[in-house]
Amino acid sequence: MYIYSSHLIQYSIEMNKNKTNKTIGILTGGGDCPGLNAAIRSLVKCSEQLGIHVKGVKKSFNGLWDEDGEIFDLTSKQVDDIQFDGGTILQTCNSGSPFHKNSKQDQNKIIEAVKNKLKKHNIDVLVVIGGDGTQTIAAEFNQVGVPIVGIPKTIDNDLEATELTIGFQTAVQIAADSLHRLQASAESHERVMILEVMGRDSGHIALHAGIAGYAHGILVPEIPYDPSIVAKMIDDRRKSGKHFSTIVIAEGAFAKEHKRTMFQTASGDKVLRGASHELAQLLHEETGLKMRSTILGYIQRGGAPCIQDAILANRYASEAIERIAAGRHGFIVSMTDDMMREIRFDEIKGKRRKIGPKDPYLKVARAHGICLGE
């Protein structure tokens, strides 16, 4: 169910802002990304306009159930210039949900600890800035009575709740700029250059960056690719006098009849690794040509936000505070068709936004003759 901004909410704010003394807590969860600090700053600034007190929670949800978790006052003076910085002043982690691996008894202990911590610090509503994993944890806490409002953040843009997440547009810009640079080398050496970007299950970064960076091939997890089709694109370009090609591939993309490449870290975690290297090997076997691959990695998540992400962070934050001031919680702020809405946690819990068959950007790629390996 979507709830739009309205004059009713504005009226409610005017009626309530002088009668309540609300306090919100802010935390950031999951991976860092450009725009987090901009969102934190905006939340503080907008709250102070309405007389709402703000507290910051360090290290995501862990700061709420750890005995030594740090919660502190946040004021305009503290956040005045953080909007230009990458990362998050509240720090973050993506260690997983306490609701999945713990026993029911341990879960209840965590829930009780969180409620007690919020009560101790007089926090009325918790504002959670994060992506799919973080908002899934938020949904669990919301279900057991913790007042929460979510703000969408993830460079993968794979949160079902909204069309745009904080960090995505900056990641696309970085990836597109990288493609422009790789093309110069590809053309100079008459090689095929492959750029691997983030995107485990959703290929939004690869698709958008591939279009903006004028890639000749775009490979995403949603469309298992045929190496022979990609090789044909390279061969056709060479026959037309273009002895170079650039391809962008999402880390979760894989060839037909192949499995995704996994790697076990020193700590025992299994992570995706090597999509670009596997593609290079398969294409070399098909064409005999030299291939070079570059993994962009965490560079996509670092640094200051682009203008679009800075604006988006401010929009989400102001909408969240407006609705909290009106006494609302239990939802994620959403944007669809450039309209801000709220969507209940239970409507998007555990869902990821993937590239669908009718995605308009797939249509753009096909219209420009970009090879999708299909």
Image: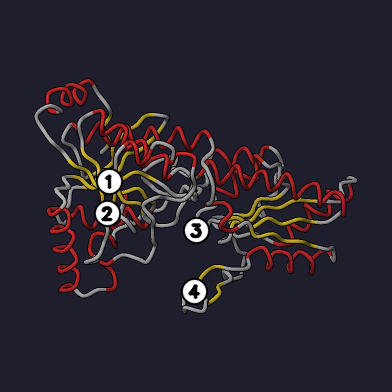
**Residue drawn at (38%, 57%) of the image:** 92
Of labels 1 and 3, earlier in sequence is 1
**Residue drawn at (16%, 22%) of the image:** 14
Q: Inspect the image, locate mark 1, and give the three-letter code of the amino acid beneath it.
A: Val
Of labels 2 and 4, earlier in sequence is 2
Q: Inspect the image, locate mark 4, and give the three-letter code of the amino acid beneath it.
A: Lys
Residue bearing the label numbered 1: 127
Element type at marker 3? Answer: loop
Task: Assess whether mark 4 and mark 3 are in contact (beta carbons under 8 angstroms).
Answer: no
Residue bearing the label numbered 2: 138
Of labels 4 and 1, earlier in sequence is 1
Element type at marker 4? Answer: strand
> Relative to 59, is 37 above or below?
above
Q: In this orientation, which residue lies closer to the viewer: 61 or 90?
A: 90
Q: Quadrant of residue 41?
A: top left
Residue 338 rendering spot, x and y as whole percentages? 42, 29
Cα separation, mark 2 vs mark 1, equals: 9 Å
- Visible in this render: residue 355? yes
